Structures are given as C-alpha cells and as structure tokens.
Image (tube, rainbow, N blue to C red):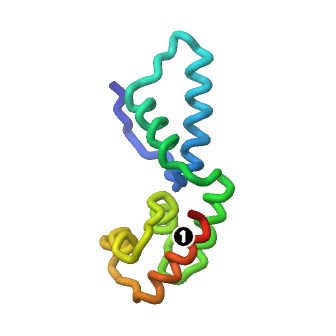
Amino acid sequence: MTIFKERVGEEYLTVAETKELLADVEAERAADEQRELRYELARAIEHVNRFATLDPEESREFVADLQELEGVEVPTAYKIANLLPEDRDELRSIYAQERYSLSGEELDEILGVVARYV
C-alpha cells in the first residue's frame, strides 16, 4: 500500500489527453512481463477508451475555446470538455457548485461550443 505525503503538482487533463498518457503506461507494462496491470489502472484504461471521443489536440482546442467565454474558468472548461453536456440541465449541473449561475444565453453559448466538437 502506498501512502502519499504531499501533493507535488496538479494539472488538468481532458479524457483524450488521459487516454494518451494511459496508453503509454499500458504499453510500458505490457513490455515488462513481470509487471501486472493493476485493477484500478485497467479500469481507468477501459474508461478512457470508452469515453474519449476527441483526439488530444482537438480536446485542447475545445478547452481553449471554452475558456474564451465569460463564466468559464479553467477547471470548469475541463469538466465541460470531459462531460460533453447536451442540454442546459446537464450544463447547469456542472455549475451547481459555483457561486454564480449563468443566464440562458450564456448556457446556450457554451452549448454552441460543445456542439462544434461533438
């Protein structure tokens, strides 16, 4: 069992970027016959393979386009890019923890960006 004592850094990733990183880890593990693919890692790989719909470059462009909109901060842009909300209700659930709410017009503007990438 590993116990982590301190957080060294933090970086936001899209599902597509995570898929790319996990593919490297999976290939590394496959090359070493003595290293087993742990359950958690196998499940993470399965998840990103199922839900990554964009390639990493497209996902970075998507996040950048979202960040250009008012009311979309970095963490929220990544949540939107990863969850791909289809309607106002799904988008509102992403903003449920925020201290502010967006107008219908702002929600539609965000959904318009999402539609360009889906």
**Which residue corresponds to the image point at 55% horizontal and 45% vertical from the top-left?**
18
Residue 59 image position (x, y, % from top left): 61, 58
Image quarter of the N terminus: top left
Residue 88 image position (x, y, % from top left): 39, 77
Mark 1 sits on what residue? 114
Q: Quadrant of residue 113?
A: bottom right
Residue 52 image position (x, y, % from top left): 54, 49
Q: Quadrant of residue 68?
A: bottom right
Residue 81 higher or lower than 51, as above or below: below
Residue 27 shown left or right of residue 37 in the figure:
right
Residue 71 image position (x, y, % from top left): 48, 81
Image quarter of the C terminus: bottom right
Q: Amino acid at mark 1?
A: Val
**Which residue corresponds to the image point at 56% horizontal and 28% vertical from the top-left?**
26
Residue 27 higher or lower than 112, as above or below: above
Residue 19 shown left or right of residue 75 in the figure:
right
**Which residue corresponds to the image point at 68% horizontal and 55% vertical from the top-left?**
57
Viewer-proximal residue among 20 and 104: 104
- The local secondary structure at tag 1 comes to helix
> Dot 1, how many residues are within 10 Å of its Cα: few (below 14), some (14-19), or many (20+)?
many
Q: Quadrant of residue 66?
A: bottom right
**Which residue corresponds to the image point at 44% horizontal and 30% vertical from the top-left?**
42
